[in-house]
């Protein structure tokens, strides 16, 4: 066990002692884990109603409170403890002092408190609301009861958990650090704000399958599994797109889903194998109208947890400023000092790649080299919110062909703080072209690309019923929270996937 818990060699003894106390409670007919206790007030309610008491002032008001013991000090005829209760989306964990005196709880009550209660236990205390001689709002107990006996010691308040211990023992992290609780609250406020914008715009929230026969909707390596009931191989979804588009075919005017996505790829400070994705689709829209929605969602998320001005490692991001549109090929041209277009010969692209120390995979098509040059040279410079558009077809097989420039698609990627945050399209609804695109993707997959999409006949069949012109977007919710808070993905995801300990 980690040394950060500060119980090292004493762990077995601590567990044994606490288990003995549990057994003692049972032997005495006192439940160590009662179904309920007669709580009348939360700790926060006591603070709100009686927080005005002057130092040393007492009342005859009796309350029943409960919480986890996070501090304890026992003297001869008086015992002190601090209780901590749970936190919510709009409030942190409240704390309140309780006092047990020989005169109020009696000899047996005080003795059992001293012998049975440890740090981390949940207890119930009933008594009068008073202010101590030091001015601390307190409950002077007349009786107490064990609510849940903790068999494992808490981390110590004076010694911080390491980053690794915080992630592996998030339950302890939440108990000890206000910052950990604040992250949970921030994510909840962001998702609430996102839903508020979408619901206000008339979008319907739906759920789509996590287990899928065919993976599609993105270029990513899927997790593979097996469904025993049908004896068929299946995958975990890598995107929400294809089923949401089927809902659009079925007549949904505006639809969205915020759900978990699974991609069997690298793990680092900005990537997790499972993460939360938002996708939304609007009929009679295109890449520009869906971009406006995306901007509204992000601004609402920023308002929900802080400021529209965000400090990043690359400088201050101003979400209130203009969100310009930048074409990919002109941006690459400016970065390399010569014109690059969708028709630039491969030899010239390879020369530019060599000049900028970009290793070219022989399997890459010509336009893929241009995209890699963009990601290497331009992407890190996009600090203020920027919609990068006019990508080659290979970049987005599910996007509509560009209405005025052959070889390009109507799609954008949104960059903020030098990182891609989301993407949006004028969605491809022509089933003939879509079949051609997915057929090409299947060829790429057959050639050994594990991230290429598969040919999804059920999706194509649905598209052949006819879908309205539409705009669609995808937004990484965890990446958005990383941007707004400055935290890494292991902090924004409450329980991230971790490599097993040796």
Image (spheres, rainbow, N blue to C red):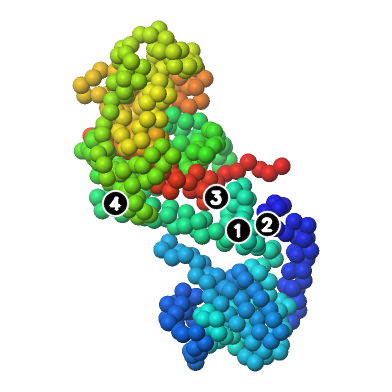
Report helix, strand or loop for mark 4. Answer: helix
283, above or below 80, in the image: above
Please give the residue where the numbered disc 1 appears in the rendered image. 172
Q: CA distance from mark 3 to mark 4?
A: 27 Å
In the rendered structure, the answer to whether residue 303 lies left or right of residue 117 reads left
* Mark 3 and mark 1: Cα distance apart in space: 12 Å
Q: SS for tag 3?
A: loop
Alpha carbon distance from label 4 to label 1: 34 Å
Please tell me which of labels 2 and 4 falls first in the chain.
2
For numbered disc 2, what is the local secondary structure? helix
Drawn side of residue 344 relative to residue 125, left or right = left
**Foreground: disc 1 or disc 2:** 2
Residue indicated by mark 3: 495
User: Which of marks 3 and 2 precedes in the sequence?
Assistant: 2
User: For residue 106, what is the image quadrant?
Assistant: bottom right
Tag 4 near tag 1, CB within 8 Å? no
Query: Where does label 4 land, which residue?
Result: 197
In the image, residue 172 sits, relative to residue 469, either above or below, namely: below
Left or right side of 369 for 129? right
- Discs 2/4, front: 2
Rendering coords of residue 146 (x, y %): 64, 77
């Amino acid at each position: 066990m980690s040394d950060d818990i500060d119980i090292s060699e004493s762990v077995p003894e601590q567990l044994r002692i606490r288990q003995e106390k549990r057994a003692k409670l049972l032997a005495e007919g006192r439940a160590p884990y009662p179904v309920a206790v007669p709580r009348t007030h939360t700790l926060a309610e006591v603070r709100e109603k009686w927080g005005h008491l002057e130092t040393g002032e007492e009342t005859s008001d009796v309350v029943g409170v409960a919480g986890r013991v996070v501090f304890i000090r026992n003297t001869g005829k008086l015992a002190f403890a601090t209780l901590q209760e749970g936190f919510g989306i709009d409030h942190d964990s409240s704390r309140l002092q309780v006092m047990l005196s020989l005169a109020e709880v009696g000899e047996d009550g005080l003795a059992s408190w001293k012998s049975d209660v440890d740090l981390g236990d949940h207890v119930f205390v009933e008594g009068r609301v008073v202010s101590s001689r030091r001015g601390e709002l307190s409950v002077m107990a007349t009786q107490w009861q064990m609510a849940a006996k903790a068999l494992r010691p808490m981390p110590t308040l004076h010694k911080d958990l390491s980053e690794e211990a915080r992630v592996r023992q998030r339950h302890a992290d939440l108990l000890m650090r206000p910052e950990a609780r604040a992250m949970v609250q921030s994510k909840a406020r962001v998702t609430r704000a996102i839903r508020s914008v979408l619901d206000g715009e008339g979008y319907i929230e739906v759920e789509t399958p996590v287990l899928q026969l065919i993976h599609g909707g993105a270029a990513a390596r899927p997790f593979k599994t097996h469904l025993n009931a049908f004896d068929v191989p299946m995958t975990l979804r890598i995107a929400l797109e294809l089923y949401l588009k089927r809902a659009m075919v079925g007549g949904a005017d505006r639809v969205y889903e915020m759900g978990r996505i699974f991609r069997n790829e690298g793990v680092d400070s900005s990537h997790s194998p499972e993460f939360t994705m938002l996708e939304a689709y609007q009929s009679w829209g295109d890449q520009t109208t869906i971009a406006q929605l995306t901007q509204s969602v992000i601004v609402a998320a920023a308002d929900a947890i802080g400021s529209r001005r965000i400090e990043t490692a690359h400088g201050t991001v101003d979400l209130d400023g203009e969100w310009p549109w930048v074409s990919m090929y002109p941006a690459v041209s400016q970065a390399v000092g010569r014109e690059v277009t969708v028709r630039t010969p491969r030899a010239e692209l390879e020369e530019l790649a060599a000049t900028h120390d970009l290793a070219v995979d022989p399997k890459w098509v010509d336009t893929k080299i241009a995209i890699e040059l963009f990601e290497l040279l331009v992407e890190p410079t996009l600090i203020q919110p920027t919609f990068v558009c006019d990508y080659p077809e290979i970049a987005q097989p599910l996007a509509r062909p560009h209405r005025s420039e052959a070889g390009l698609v109507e799609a954008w990627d949104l960059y903020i703080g030098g990182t891609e945050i989301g993407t949006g399209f004028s969605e491809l609804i022509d089933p003939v072209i879509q079949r051609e695109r997915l057929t090409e993707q299947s060829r790429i997959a057959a050639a050994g690309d594990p991230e290429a999409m598969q040919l999804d006949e059920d999706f194509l069949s649905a598209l052949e019923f006819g879908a309205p012109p539409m705009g669609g977007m995808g937004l990484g919710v965890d990446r958005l929270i990383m941007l707004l808070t400055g935290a890494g993905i292991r902090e924004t995801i409450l329980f991230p996937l971790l490599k097993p300990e040796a």
